[in-house]
Image (cartoon, rainbow, N blue to C red):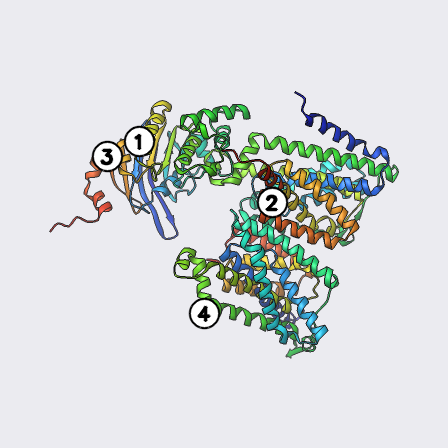
Amino acid sequence: MLKPKHILFPLVMIMLFAFPVVRPPLFFLTLCFSVFMFVGLSESWNLLGGYTGYVSLGHIAFFSTGAYTTAVFMNRFGISPFITAILGGVFSAVLAALVGYPVLRLKGAYFTISSLLLAVVMQLIFMNWDFVGSSTGLWYKLLPVSIEVNRILFYEAMLIVATAITLVVRYVERSKFGAGLVAIREDEDVAKTMGINTPWLKMKAFILGAFLAGVVGGIYGYYMSYVHPEVTFSMNTSLLILLMSFFGGCRSWSGPLLGAVVLSLANQLIVTFIGAEISRILYGLLLVVVIIFMPDGVMQYAKGLFVREKR
Amino acid sequence: MLEGIKVTRRFGGLMALTNLDFTVEQGQIVGLIGPNGSGKTTLFNVITGFYPADSGKIIFKGKEITRCKPYEIARLGIARTFQIVRPLLGLSALDNVTTAVLYGREQIAGMAKGRERAAELLAYVRLDDKKDVPAQRLVAAERKRLELARALALKPEFLLLDEVFSGLNDTEIQDAIKLIFRIRDDLGVTIFLIEHVMKAVMGTCEKIFVIQYGVKLAEGKPEEVSRDPAVIEAYLGKKRTC
Amino acid sequence: MSLSYIIESIISGLLLGGIYALLSVGFGLTWGTMKVLNISHAVFAVLGAFVSYWLFVKAGLDPLLSLPLLAALLFLVGAVLYRLVIRPVQKARDVIMASMVATFGVAIVVENLMSFIWRPDPRILKPPYAGSSIFIGEMAISQGPLIGFIMAITSIALLYLFLHHTYIGKGVQATWQNPTGAALVGINPGTVSLITFALSIASAGVAGVAMAMIYAFYPSVQSVWTMFVFLVTIVGGVGSVIGTGLAGLLIGFIIGLCAAFLPFVWVNVLLFALLLAILLFKPEGLFGT
């Protein structure tokens, strides 16, 4: 049976893919690009943060690893950015595998703090590591095509990546893997008695999330054509990722998608037209309000308003 | 089928279990009783790998499981329920059991098949009319049945029940006793249960272990144990002889 | 490198450590006792620094004289924050996580409000006496850190005395050990939470003034200070005033010792690596119970 969503979804996708054809001003292209980026980041964050409830503030560490991998491999070895983006994902995954074993043994706040520390320590190291440009950052060598074509190329790349990530997360959510992750969130001990190898499952979610964030980072870095530790490791990005997932509702793949689209659009608009400080103040307030009044996210909250509870 | 040899567990300086020996034969229903704080739940946690034993051995079907992790022990076929039931509160009754089925020993692949099997299990514990209700909104007796269904979803050979009768009224206890016999007889599951409700223990168990301060006080048939002077003393205090 | 240089470095590290201890003590208290993990703790230290600086520059009020006023003001801010944010969050299923996320939002709000009001440029609080030094033999000890340290130790001591030797303080302790029992004997848990939280914010404000006498401060420095709060609290063990104090001094000692041999940034990398290691191997803290 053909439902509206079977037409709507491909239609939206075609429109998004075709968007650069109308030669939009750079502002709109970048606006869409940042929406796709945040969709990719908050969906990949949600694998661990939303389903298992292990709230990570270190997701930007993987994102930045991706951005820096692309920068270094392109500049030093002249490798194509499409390969380095994947490579960035692989490096992020390796990093996640290395830190994951000890860090994922920690629970609750201890996990969150160590994930935050991971990002902070990496930022400090990158600020002082000359190979990656230390505190001056790194410029990317652009591909030998016009800057406009470059932008469009990476707009499309980010769109594909964001779509792929969303589909992967949606698939995970509906699989045995996803059911296991949710059991961990609800009660990790009980999950063990069900025969779930909880450390391994958390590890898989962590590594997969890191890989996806690394790929996003690679493409982001190239689009921006510049990386700097203070920009890529910004705590503000962590805040936004967290807020988007919580705002939309982190129990389902649709939550981070909704949150990322609505909030990154709003964020860009407020930053551009009103000011970055005001936008952050509004975001901070929004996070507080969401946590207090809508702990399951706006989607669930709206459902609760409109749908009467079944008896 | 399950054997413990000199099982010992300490918490800091406190001896929770001391050189405890026990055996449970295949097909039996065995009870574990003792006053509060005597180490019953600790023993279950040691068997299921949550608190590894400090010394001693636990052998299941001829294989040592003392150092196994909780999920490994579950996969070997030992299921358990918790004293204070712990359903996955955010999920529906059906989803609770479905997850357990998917990760269980029946090797059921695919969500649809998993749900089907889970629905059967809920029907088995007579909870099929509540399958779409969030676990959070089930009452205590229903939560206990849900927990049982979840344990059965593993397709266990051995089931550890921690106070499944407590808080139930008389009819509910009778139902629960029948259910336990059915689990043993239909599904061939060996059962080891902790119980406070004496009537239920006497009515179901073929053998009873009594422990106090982590030490075995008595073991035997229910009627023997209930006549044992050491047991009476532990439960009722010393009989005054004058 | 002379021995006196190393000793000087260690002493200034210890002075700094005392201030870090005060910066962290309230954070550990609310985490340990109320299960509220207040990520916005350090932002109120920065707020304290700004208010003190503003009073000093605009009204000519010496930071030491304005300290009681500042503590009272931040106590009030803490009480309001408790009513608006913390109390609703305490109803959540997982209070620690909910409070962490909510106060993360609060931190961002306050930080950006400060940059909005006072501009994000770095400043330093320099009353005339903070610039000079005391000389002991060859060693110079700057008065700024020394005064900050004395402020910190006095405040920690006052907090300790309050918790252990006053009626309300004992009520606070009783509630956190056994909320039902305390409620039964007539202690209102809401009031106790409010006092604990407001005191914690006030102590952060005082610590902020002490920090401002040593370091340049600006709104976004709060994230750096937050890291030090985590560091001290986790090393000391959550919820112990004495443990936090000792941890602060220990960290100060390490900073002082390392700073004599390493560039400053690598000292920080080393410290956070140490923190990660403690989290992983001894999450209850070195001085925890």
Is there CB contact under 8 Å for labels 2 and 4?
A: no
Q: CA gap, disc 3 to disc 1?
A: 18 Å
In the shown orientation, is residue C276 left or right of residue A3?
left
Location of mark 1 (residue): B174
Residue A20 placement: quadrant: top right
Three-letter residue code for mark 2: Val
* Vertical relation: A172 (above or below) A49: above
Q: Residue at x 78, y 42 (%)?
A: A31
In the rendered image, the vertical position of residue A308 relative to residue A272, given as above or below: above
Which residue is situated farthest in the right direction here?
A: A146
Per the model, the C-alpha gap separating discs 3 and 4 is 57 Å
Per the image, label 1 sits on a secondary structure element best described as helix
Instruction: Give the CA distance from mark 2 to mark 3.
Output: 53 Å
- Marks 4/1: CA–CA distance: 56 Å
Q: Are marks 2 and 3 in contact (CB under 8 Å)?
A: no
Circle 2 marks a residue in which chain? A
Toward the left, the furthest residue is B242
Q: Amino acid at mark 3?
A: Pro
Position in image of residue C83 (x %, y %): 56, 58
Closer to viewer: mark 4 or mark 1: 1
Pointer 4 residue: C166
Farthest residue to the top: give it.
A1
Element on which disc 3 rests:
helix
Residue C121 appears in the picture as rendered: yes
Residue at position x 75%, y 49% in the image: A270
**Residue that numbered label 2 is attached to:** A99
Q: Position of residue C223 (x, y in %)?
A: 66, 57
Q: Are marks 4 and 1 on the same chain?
A: no
How would you rate the neighbour count of disc 4 (Cα within 10 Å): few for under 14, some for 14-19, many for 20 or more?
few
The residue that label 3 is drawn on is: B222
